[in-house]
Amino acid sequence: MASFAAPTTMSPLPGDIRLMQTTANAVFVLAALALCAAALLWLTRLPIFAVRSIKIDGEVVRNSVSTIRANAGPKLAGNFFTLDLQKSRAAFEAVPWVRHAVVRRVWPNRLAVQLEEHHAAALWATEDGNDKLVNSQGEVFEANPGDVEDEALPRFAGPEGSSAAMLALHRRLQPVLAALNAGDVGELKLSGRGSWRAALEGGAVIELGRGSDDEVIARSERFVRTMAQVNERYQRPLEYADLRHADGYAVRLKGITTTVPAAPARRR
């Protein structure tokens, strides 16, 4: 008579039980995180967090607060949580006359904006004739030159990226050439080869030549000392001077053209 063995049931090994528990826990945690993320996303989209107001502080001389809001507001996308602060800053800095903006969130639905405006220091000549402006940091910016109350701004013309160097030299050159009593430096030009030219408001043009700022200023100082003697002798207004000569200066006074030996360098 045949006999049959009863089938045996295999119990899970302890390692398998731990794996299943770990997997279940991970699934639970992921589900909980997904639920929290969905809830957080839902909360951030509630109308209560829409940006309700924008407080603007700082310099608002060139623009009214309402004008700034009207220009930058349509470019602001998102609510208190989703608003991109970098893009928001760029939106305010795109407003004419705004140089720098700092944008902060203020709980729960406001923005605080601190503005710094450009301060015009010179005009910047362009090839198309539409002058731009140079601010007090030497940066070229676009704005309506007609908005500037100061009609005596100097005019710069030079290679792209040279505006800061031109402003720096103008600030040093102005007090030196003021001793000629021929007007302020109304125009300063820098050629592509690095040669400087200044035009005074009285009409005189001075070729300053190439070199470092210190070299240009040193030549200008020697020229001014020489011109004191020339003016005393001829009593004629200056029309043109060329300081690019190593051994002297070519000078044209009204009705007179002459060459003046270089004055000795002053010992410092």
Image (tube, rainbow, N blue to C red):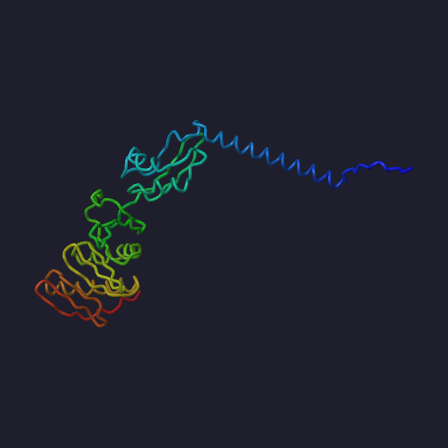
The quadrant in which residue 85 appears is top left
| Residue 47 sits in quarter | top left
| In the depicted structure, whether residue 48 falls above or below residue 133 | above
Q: Residue at x 41, y 30 (%)?
A: 50
Q: For the N terminus, which image quadrant?
A: top right
Q: Nearer the viewer, residue 248 or 204?
A: 204
Name the residue: 36% across, 43% down.
90
In which quadrant of the rendered image does the C terminus lie?
A: bottom left
Q: Residue lying furthest right in this view?
A: 1
Compared across the picture, whether 265 is left or right of 42 comes to: left
Closest to the observer, 244 or 64: 64
Instruction: Give the left or right position of residue 189, taking residue 93 as reference.
Output: left
Q: Most extreme residue toward the bottom, as rendered? A: 247
Q: Using residue 242 as the reference point, say whether residue 63 is left or right of it.
A: right
Which residue is outermost to the top?
48
Q: Position of residue 73 (x, y in %)?
A: 34, 35
Q: Residue at x 73, y 40 (%)?
A: 16
Q: Quadrant of residue 203?
A: bottom left
Most foreground residue, 27 or 98: 27
Q: Position of residue 125 (x, y in %)?
A: 22, 53
Q: Nearer the viewer, residue 3 or 89?
A: 3
